[in-house]
């Protein structure tokens, strides 16, 4: 599971974002929205993978915005995301508890130390503050969520109390308690060839949906054929199959969210 951030491709650095970086409460966020959003009082929280406000996540947020959503990506890594050089093969991940020595430190990221800095309880606290800020600004807002990889776990946690509907793609670090008591519609997108999560994850989700969610909660699980970890967030767009499934995952998410958006 620790290798999850080594797979996928970075987006082109030439991409010109449609939105802007701003501050919301304690966090910087990327905010983007169609000039004529379908519903002014819906917000979509896009909870990113370990690369935070990298171009591939901004591009994804802009794609949701083009479909009529007002989208917010929170920088819950507080300016300390994993460097995009990992996807380019320029920087390696070190899984040892002790930091690398000498010049190696410039070319390695100590993943256990990084995960400790951005531990799940801390990230959950930041997201709680963020959603409280949004609700304080407009108590009538309906919050929706989509999370990828690292963010997949946290969109499940938010769905326990805050969201109107939630979708998670190839979520990492998922535990049963992340789903306990969820009573809003849930969509799970998994990659058939994901070697970065437990082999039992699809079966686990099916079991958890029956035992941990509130009764009669709409639950959907889709397995994306031939895909590896990260395909729905940071695809290799030169690969026709991956590009097709990335596009399908986006369309599936939009279709799911549209069923539950507040008019």
Image (cartoon, helix red, strand yellow):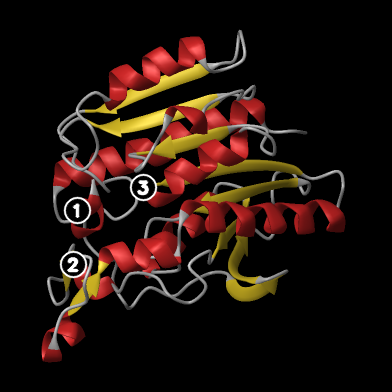
Describe residue 106's horizontal placement relative to residue 11 as left or right. left
Q: Quadrant of the N terminus?
A: top left
Single out the residue that lies furthest toward the bottom. 103
Tag shown at residue 93:
2
Given residues 233 and 155, the one toward you in this image is 155
The residue under label 3 is 149
Who is closer to the viewer here, 60 or 91? 91
**Residue annotated with mark 1:** 3
Q: Are marks 2 and 1 in contact (CB under 8 Å)?
A: yes
N-term mark: 2 or 1: 1
Give the distance between the C-alpha atoms of the residues marked 1 and 3, in whole angstroms. Answer: 11 Å
Q: Residue at x 39, y 70 (%)?
A: 81
Residue 113's spot in the image, x, y percent? 33, 68
Q: Quadrant of residue 221?
A: top left
Please, is residue 85 above or below residue 11 in the view?
Answer: below
Evaluate whether residue 71 shows in this view: no
Residue furthest to the front in view is 98
* Res. 96 in view: yes
Q: Secondary structure at mark 1?
A: helix
Q: Residue at x 59, y 75 (%)?
A: 21
């Amino acid at each position: 599971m620790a290798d999850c951030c080594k797979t996928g491709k970075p987006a082109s650095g030439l991409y010109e974002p449609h939105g802007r970086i701003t501050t919301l409460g304690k966090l910087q966020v990327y905010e983007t929205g169609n000039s004529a959003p379908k519903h002014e009082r819906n917000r979509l929280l896009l909870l990113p993978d370990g690369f935070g406000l990298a171009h591939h996540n901004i591009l994804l947020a802009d794609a949701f915005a083009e479909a009529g959503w007002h989208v917010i990506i929170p920088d819950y890594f507080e300016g300390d995301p994993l460097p995009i050089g990992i996807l380019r093969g320029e920087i390696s991940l070190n899984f040892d508890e002790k930091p690398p020595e000498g010049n190696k430190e410039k070319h390695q990221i100590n993943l256990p130390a990084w995960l400790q800095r951005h531990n799940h309880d801390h990230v959950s606290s930041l997201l709680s503050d963020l959603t409280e800020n949004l609700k304080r600004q407009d108590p009538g807002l309906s919050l929706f969520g989509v999370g990828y990889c690292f963010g997949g776990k946290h969109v499940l946690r938010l769905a326990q109390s805050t969201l109107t509907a939630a979708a998670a793609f190839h979520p990492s670090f998922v535990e049963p308690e992340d789903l306990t008591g969820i009573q809003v519609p849930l969509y799970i997108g998994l990659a058939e060839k994901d070697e970065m999560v437990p082999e039992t994850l699809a079966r686990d989700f099916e079991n958890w949906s029956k035992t941990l969610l509130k009764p009669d909660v709409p639950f959907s699980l889709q397995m994306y054929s031939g895909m590896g970890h990260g395909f729905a967030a940071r695809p290799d767009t030169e690969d026709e199959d991956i590009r097709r499934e990335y596009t399908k995952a986006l369309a599936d998410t939009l279709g799911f969210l549209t069923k539950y958006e507040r008019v």
